[in-house]
Amino acid sequence: MPPKRRPEVRGGGGEPSSPQPQAVLKKRCRSFDLEIRGCRHLQELAASCFHRIEAALESAISRIPEEVTKAVTSFLSHSPSFCRTLADQNQPPRYKLRFTNCLSNEVFTKKGICDVNGEPLKISVDVSNQKEAISRRLLSAKIRVVVLDGDFNKNDQECWTSDEFTNHIVRPRDKVGAVLTGELELRLKNGEAYLHDATFVDNSKFTRSGKFRLGVMVIDDLGERVQEGITEPFVVKDRRGEGSKKHEIPSLDDDVWRLKKISKDGVFHEALKGSSILNVKDFLRLYYTDEQALRKILVKATDKIWTTIVDHAKKCDPGRELYYFFMENHNVVLFFNSVYQIVGVKQGDHNIPFSDLDKIVQVLLWYRLRASKVSDTKGFCSKSLCSTCVKDFISTNHSYKTSKLGFRNVLLKRVIVLLFCTQSCALETIVFSFGSTFAGSGRTIEKICI
């Protein structure tokens, strides 16, 4: 439907009113012209402001190098050590802290930290140039002992940065508290300090490596960096496991499960107990008298485990007990220690260390000894059998090397035990029975105290 047409409005004379488009257009053009002129003015104003800002920035920037140079020069003139540090930042530090003694591979919580000999850990200052004197401030500087993750410096680098050291400090676990407690801030005295009072509270199981390191750092501001000191990695265990700790150097009276790879009440321990091997002394005696029999008892052990057990047992100190066996038919005297390991040979009036004998002579001597049902040779006593001889032998041969020859098919006929008593130099003979080993031999063992 087409839209309705509006009626024309007529004037008083009846004619339609004529519109005034020219006036409206002129008005609009005037307004538009004013707007354009305003925009031009703003544009000119903006350009003027931009030029003024640009000129101000150029002036300020041109003065920056001069001001920075003045500031840096003033700072360095008051801090010469900083300038030296910047120059030497890529070089190893002149001074280093270090631990002079070693911790055990195993440490237990709630127990004072000490070295393998039970002595306090010692910290000292090292200087790269031995001819260079250490400053007094460093010799009496304050240091702090911290706990590091065992992974720190796993590549055994000579140097590291302070940030690398700090980032590896172990943070305490929630609800456990500090990892290490005690007197951890020390004062160097003549460049040395001792860690007397320090105890682990937490074990090292929660770390990625399962181990800790101890670290020590200088906390005084000395004007140059002193490289931190670190220990070797070690395991921290709960003190409840100390009762089953393996001794690094076993003793003769240690239970046999104290040897490495032998767990308490484990398969190897039960097998050894079943053969009446209760301590390290029993273990070594059977090893030197019948190695194959001992190997059969530990038949479930691999060759690697067997070697580990035997090597650990051989670290044991055999003590000052010394035996000798006289072979009358061949005029040969064999000396051996408390675990029946041969440690000396004497033939007639000639004394030659067994290690100095030619290999062929060793084999010939071996067969001669086997003919007398004694089959091991080792070491040598360099003098006749007397108190002076024995004391010299002990003083010069206290550490015995291990013979690879077995000590099999043993039936000793006469053995003299030499025990060294520092209280008396008198020669005393005590006769006693050795037991079933020599049953039917009609012989006895003479025990001499010197």
Image (spheres, grey):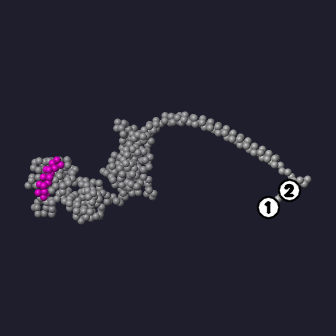
Q: Name the residue under label 2.
A: 8
Q: What element carries label 1?
A: loop
Return the x and y of residue 375 as percentages of the image width and height: 15, 56
**Residue 357 inside the magenta-drawn segment:** yes
The image quarter containing residue 325 is bottom left
Q: Give the range drawn in magenta.
A: 355-374
Q: Callout 1: 10 Å neighbours few (<14), some, many (20+)?
A: few
Q: Nearer the viewer, residue 19 or 173?
A: 19
Give the numbered dot on residue 203.
none
Upstream in sequence: badge 1 or badge 2: 1
Return the x and y of residue 446 as percentages of the image width and height: 13, 57
Residue located at (37% from left, 36% from top): 133
Amino acid type, mark 2? Glu
Residue 219 is left or right of residue 368, and the answer is right
Task: State the predominant SS element of the stretch in magenta.
Answer: helix
Q: Callout 2: 10 Å neighbours few (<14), some, many (20+)?
A: few
Q: Nearer the viewer, residue 144 or 131?
A: 131
Q: Is residue 86 above or below residue 247?
A: above
Residue located at (65% from left, 39% from top): 50
Q: Which quarter of the rendered picture does the N terminus lie within? A: bottom right
Give the numbered dot on residue 2.
1
**Residue 335 inside the magenta-drawn segment:** no
The image quarter containing residue 255 is bottom left
Return the x and y of residue 395 as percentages of the image width and height: 20, 48
Q: Is residue 372 above or below residue 92?
A: below
Q: Nearer the viewer, residue 113 or 82?
A: 82
Q: What element carries label 2?
A: loop
Residue extending furthest toward the right: 13
Q: How far apart are marks 1 and 2 (CA)?
A: 18 Å
Q: Is residue 32 in sight in this rendering? A: yes
